[in-house]
Image (cartoon, rainbow, N blue to C red):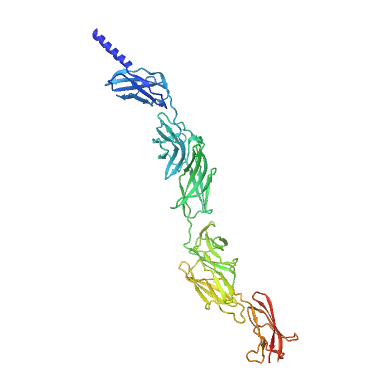
Amino acid sequence: MKKYFLTLFFLSCVLLSKSQYITIELDNNNIDGLIPLTFHTDKTIWDSIRIYYKTDLMTTPEWLHTLKFDNVHYVDSVHCEEGGNVIYQAELYSENVLIAESGDFPDEPITEIDPEPTIPILDSISYINNQLVMGWTTIPDSTLKSFKIYKRTEGFYNIQEINDIEASYAVIDSDSISPCENQDKLILVAVDNCRETGNLFPEYAQALTKIKNLIWDKCDKSITIKISKYITSLAIHQEIVKHQVFVSKADELPVLLGEIDKDKEEFIHRNVEYGEEYTYFIRTFLTSDNGNATSTSCEKSITTEQINLPDFFQILYSSVIPGTNSIKTIVKVSDPTGLSNFLILRSEDNENFFQVAKLNWNGNKEIEWTDLTAKPHLKSYYYKAALLDECDNIAIYSENTTKTIHLDIDTKDIGNELSWNRYEGGGFDQYLIYRSTDGNFNFEEEPIATIFFDQAMSHTDFTELTEGLNQWSYIVKAISKLGDSNASDYVFETYSNIVTSNNPSIVRLANAFMPSSTTSPIFKPIFTGIDLDNYAFSIFNRGGQMIFHTTNPEEGWDGKYNGEIVQQGVYVYQVSYIDNENKQKSVRGTVVVVK
């Protein structure tokens, strides 16, 4: 009987110790789903505490965690994922022997208090250096564990988790998205110990601006950029301010091309070049409750069609046609095969060119054209040619621009000062000056002067007009160096306009003459600078009777009337002519006939 009693006593002591020497205390409060527990015991010899929990969804307690010796604190964050209310139980063990156990704690189940994590503010999504980058505003939340990125399709799919809770951006590394092909909608959520933020809704989604299409119009020489606009988050009142279009060629840096209005989805890049690769991207400017942000799209490239261009296309020369107010221009191309039309453009300042002719090659390598609307006697002109493509757009301009020679004259007492501009657009290295009395030039004769390209473009002619000459006319002929094999195998010549000296009209007569003299038996005017086609010379006696008349400038009065020498005395002469200013003039005077 004694032995049995002791056994019962021992068992009762053990049972008593189980219920008395392990208790549970709730530290502070359960915040954000975290329930901090502290365990108390008077036992000095123990090695573990086994913790059990039960929610109102469970019929029996389940093991939760085991604490090792000297650790009497535990924070529960597991049960919050299951929801509902919770109670706890604890068992104290020593060498795997149960030495004490608690009752249910607390008397009333703990109601879960788990505030939702702060919703992160996604600023924008960008494609930078071939990587998709999300940027957001850092959120203050002491229980934050990570961020998650979801892709929105028909549902929500977690594609990446970011464990750096201080991060404000992330490079998205996922095979499940193709931001440059598809306009993937993405949502950023925050995760704490118990749950994620509750913003997995379409209005939180954002998606990158996408360049849908690049359309090359060869005839318009334009590229149309079609975009899908940035998908904004309605939840943060995000709006598009504008889109900027950037473009680059080959190894060049991107430049701002223009802007797309926030309500538009198209931009036209005009005046593009043939055979070039153009790369575009869109920068979107955004505004929201969180402030302003920008987003950069993926790049998209297109190569414009290359057209067949000749090896060379140039103006051989432009020249005033001597004796006219017309300018001849000769254009040459290496191979006219496949070419149709080209333009001749003219300018007075080498900046503002306008079309003066549209010509067809007709299978010829050289085309000559005459400008009948120019006024080369007043100014020089610039000419260049423009090759047209099959759409009648300008494909290329000629390799050179020519400038005709304009000659000026300033008549002075000492002579005629000539000046002209250098010819431009070819290797003309000599300027030959020719002179004429009637405006007709014999270019086979020696010029009166030769000026080389490195000399001043001027010359003074000191030659005086002789009797019977009205005025001097001048022209400059420029001679080029020998053309290369691509251009021509002969020496080019180009001419200036013709200028005429402004010499005064002069008529001189003697005041006496002796008909019987052997030195001056003829009385006639000496003149320069008059119109010989409108000339008349008459002699009158003192009674007013005309005794001599001629319209031949070479004929003079021999002092006779009706075959007999007139009496000695004073006679009146009259010379009528048109001067070099085209004015009718008449000179009257007297001459003494001496026998």
Pick whichever, 585 or 150, lies toward us. Answer: 585
Measured as percent of width and height from the top left, residue 463 is found at: 56, 79
Up/down of 226 relative to 56, above or below: below
Locate the C terminus and report the quarter of the image it occupies.
Answer: bottom right
Locate the N terminus and report the quarter of the image it occupies.
Answer: top left
Please, which residue is most extreme toward the top here? 1
Measured as percent of width and height from the top left, residue 184 is found at: 46, 39
Residue ID at (46%, 31%):
198
Measured as percent of width and height from the top left, residue 27 is found at: 38, 23
Would you say 314 lies left or right of 534 here? left
Would you say 551 lies left or right of 391 here? right
Up/down of 567 relative to 581, above or below: below
Please, which residue is most extreme toward the right here? 543
Would you say 238 lies left or right of 96 here? right
Pick whichever, 236 or 70, lies toward us. Answer: 70
Up/down of 429 relative to 149, above or below: below
Residue 120 visible in the shown view: yes
Measured as percent of width and height from the top left, residue 362 is found at: 53, 64
